[in-house]
Image (tube, rainbow, N blue to C red):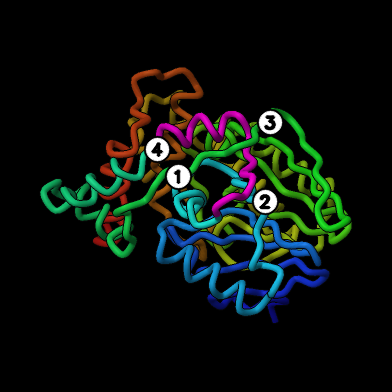
Amino acid sequence: MARWQYTKGLHDLGNQAYAYLQPDGGWGWSNAGLITSDAGALLIDTLFDLPLTREMLETMRARVPAAQRIDTLINTHANPDHTFGNELVPGAEIISTTACAQEMSELQPGALATLMRHASGMGATGAFLLELFGVFDFEGITLTPPTRTFDGNLSITFGGRELQLVEVGPAHTRGDLLVYVPEDRTVFTGDILFASGHPVMWAGPIANWIGACDCILEWAPETVVPGHGPITDCSAIERLKTYLTYLSEEVRQRFDAGMPVLEAARDINIDDYGDWGEAERMVANVASLYREFGDATIPSDIISLLGLMATYRSEAASGG
């Protein structure tokens, strides 16, 4: 039996630490963290839109009085499903890596809202966009960037305990960080871990992502809160590292053989990860590795990659 139930809402990790989960953990359904003290609270990530973030904050404040005052917000990376709710924590110091802050400035909420308004006229790619993100509300969001940035490592003290912020990007994105709480033997991974789902590598290099796994395993935490999916332990990190190593080796063979990205993604056997969702992310991962291996012609823009992923998913559903 799993140690933690995978249900929506706030989960008590002990010692005034909490995780907020959003099943099923697929595209856009991210997690967040909360650490409290007698003086207030520290939040790790917000959610994809204002209604979801507002619901999360209301839940936290109803359960944990200290959450009425959130003085510090840590963004683990720049993806909108971890940052678009930042404006609902007014007055908080917002901490991220320098690279995260730069990338966040390039992901304007208004642009995503406009894209979704036009998705119905974008063919298969637009249909895929609506399938993934049609339930979220991107209207009226004000981008609220970090107010404090760092490179490398940053140690902060909150409520008498140390939090170690460790930059491990570029990996999933350009500016990923881990939040480790040594006293609690707990790590909040951001999207370095998609528990029970395929990771998606927008940035790379893959060696940095494997290095992030090694960093977590060296800490040997008892509790691992992923960016998406159920609360877990180091076994999920070990499995992710195995997957990333396998992926790198398999993609390299197909790159050397001259296979196109989509064909390579189809050709790689992922039966050992058949219990993971979002298999279409293989396409983005292959594309990222092809660029890493030296093919500068491989597209990196999200629309092109989503189009390829839509084709991959459609073919998989039809048995093609």
Task: Specify which label sits upstream in the sequence, 3 or 1.
Answer: 3
Identify whether 296 is placed above or below 118: above
Mark 1 neighbour density, 10 Å: few (under 14) some (14–19) many (20 or more)? some
Q: For the residue labelled by badge 3, is the local secondary structure a helix, a strand or a loop?
A: strand
Task: Specify which label sits upstream in the sequence, 4 or 2.
Answer: 2
Q: Can residue 234 be found in the magenta stretch?
A: no
To which residue does mark 4 refer?
Answer: 107
Q: For the residue labelled by badge 4, is the local secondary structure a helix, a strand or a loop?
A: loop
Mark 3 or 1: in front is: 3
Q: For the residue labelled by badge 2, is the local secondary structure a helix, a strand or a loop?
A: strand
Residue 150: mark in rendering? 3
Left or right: residue 47 versus residue 159 is left
Residue 313: mark in rendering? none
Task: Specify which label sits upstream in the sequence, 2 or 1.
Answer: 2
Which amino acid type is marked by label 3? Phe
To which residue does mark 2 refer?
Answer: 72
Residue 268: mark in rendering? 1
> For residue 5, which quarter of the picture?
bottom right
Quadrant in which the N terminus appears: bottom right
Task: Specify which label sits upstream in the sequence, 3 or 2.
Answer: 2
Magenta stretch bounds: 90-106
What whole-number distance in Å separates the C-alpha atoms at marks 3 and 2? 15 Å
Left or right: residue 276 versus residue 141 is right
Question: Residue at coordinates 50% horizontally, 22% vertically from top-left?
Answer: 293
